[in-house]
């Protein structure tokens, strides 16, 4: 038992080491060299908080993205960051957290390039607006500038099943957006006010990020007047977005890295990604975490299912 106890103690102690020691950097093959470094940070899938811990987990989420960006900010060798996005958007606060971290990088004199891949909608576009340069593919789906609030209503189904819900509240608005009763018009108006306020925040971010780029005027008021009609929630192809000034050009990772080197004023740089260190137990836990839950032949992910019944504001495109 002693070897096992020793290993268990090492695992526990690993959680107490400093933040940077839980991660390592690995170079991307055939992507430059030199003492200067360019970090590539990936944002894939829905934007939300959460992420892998010491013993595994989903290994993603904006908590881990923000950790990587903080490490890049504090590393003097990192001269620029490329953020690669393939996302339909997601949580309002998580999107804003990543946006803030990119602005902090730029404040430290470290340029940021956003590379939009197949899909970079809503919260993904929000994050892109913090970059010095935004690149995409001609067929990239981007935009979807807006806010959505969704709450399910199951009153019809519940009536068929003979199910009802007893609700006791401290006030008449405590159960607003409950799935067990229709929404009242005054409640809808209250939620619309929240959406309008959050939309104003999104539009302000777009104006600050895109003013002076391409055909978008440099003055705030003129930029807003031009961008507001585009910010009605619709999506655009990369070609449309370039014409409208929502992105700066076309490209893939090589072009994004070349732009990062240009902005950082370095001719050569080692390109790398961060990777979390995994202990033996972490590898086992990670394998367990990614094991699909299948019910009657259907892959069920409980976390995603629970989110369907959780109302909230989102910078999200629901077309995918």
Image (cartoon, helix red, strand yellow):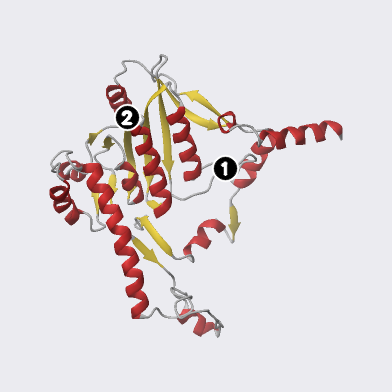
Is residue 164 placed above or below 94 in the rendered structure? Answer: below
| Residue 313 x, y percent position in the rendering | 39, 61
Q: Nearer the viewer, residue 309 or 78?
A: 78
Which mark is on residue 26? none
Lower position in the chain sequence, tag 1 or tag 2: 1
Is residue 267 placed above or below 178 in the rendered structure? Answer: above
Is disc 2 surrounded by few (<14), some (14 to 19) or many (20+) residues within 10 Å?
A: many
Which mark is on residue 52? 1
Residue placed under numbered mark 2 in the picture = 111
| Residue 48 x, y percent position in the rendering | 46, 50
Q: Nearer the viewer, residue 130 or 282?
A: 130
> Residue visible at 14% across and 53% down?
225
Which quadrant would the N terminus be assigned to in this image? top right
| Residue 8 x, y percent position in the rendering | 76, 36
Q: Secondary structure at mark 2?
A: loop
Is disc 1 surrounded by few (<14), some (14 to 19) or many (20+) residues within 10 Å?
A: some
> Residue visible at 30% across and 54% down?
201
Question: Quadrant location of residue 69?
Answer: top left
Question: Quadrant location of residue 156?
Answer: bottom left
């Amino acid at each position: 038992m002693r070897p096992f106890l020793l290993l268990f103690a090492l695992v526990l102690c690993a959680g107490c080491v400093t933040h940077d020691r839980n991660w390592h950097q690995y170079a991307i093959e055939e992507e430059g060299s030199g003492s200067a470094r360019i970090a590539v940070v990936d944002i894939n899938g829905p934007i939300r908080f959460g992420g892998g811990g010491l013993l595994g987990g989903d290994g993603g989420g904006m908590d881990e993205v923000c950790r990587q960006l903080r490490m890049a900010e504090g590393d003097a060798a990192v001269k620029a960051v490329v953020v690669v996005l393939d996302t339909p958007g997601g949580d309002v606060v998580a999107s804003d957290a990543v946006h803030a971290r990119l602005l902090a990088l730029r404040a430290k004199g470290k340029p940021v390039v956003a590379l939009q891949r197949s899909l970079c909608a809503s919260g993904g576009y929000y994050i892109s607006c913090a970059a010095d340069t935004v690149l995409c593919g001609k067929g990239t789906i981007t935009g979807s500038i807006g806010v959505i609030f969704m709450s399910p209503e199951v009153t019809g189904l519940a009536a068929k099943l003979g199910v009802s819900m007893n609700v006791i509240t401290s006030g008449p608005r405590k159960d607003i957006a409950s799935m067990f009763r229709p929404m009242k018009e005054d409640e809808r108006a209250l939620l619309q006010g929240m959406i309008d306020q959050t939309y104003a925040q999104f539009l302000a971010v777009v104006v600050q990020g895109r003013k002076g780029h391409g055909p978008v005027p440099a003055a705030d008021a003129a930029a807003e007047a031009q961008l507001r009609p585009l910010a009605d929630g619709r999506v655009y192809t990369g070609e449309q977005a370039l014409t409208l000034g929502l992105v700066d050009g076309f490209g893939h990772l090589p072009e994004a890295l070349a732009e990062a080197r240009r902005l950082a004023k370095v001719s050569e740089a080692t390109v790398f990604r961060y990777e979390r260190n995994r202990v033996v137990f972490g590898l086992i836990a990670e394998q367990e975490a990614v094991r699909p839950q299948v019910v009657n032949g259907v892959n069920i992910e409980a976390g995603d299912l629970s989110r369907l019944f959780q109302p909230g504001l989102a910078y999200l495109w629901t077309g995918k």
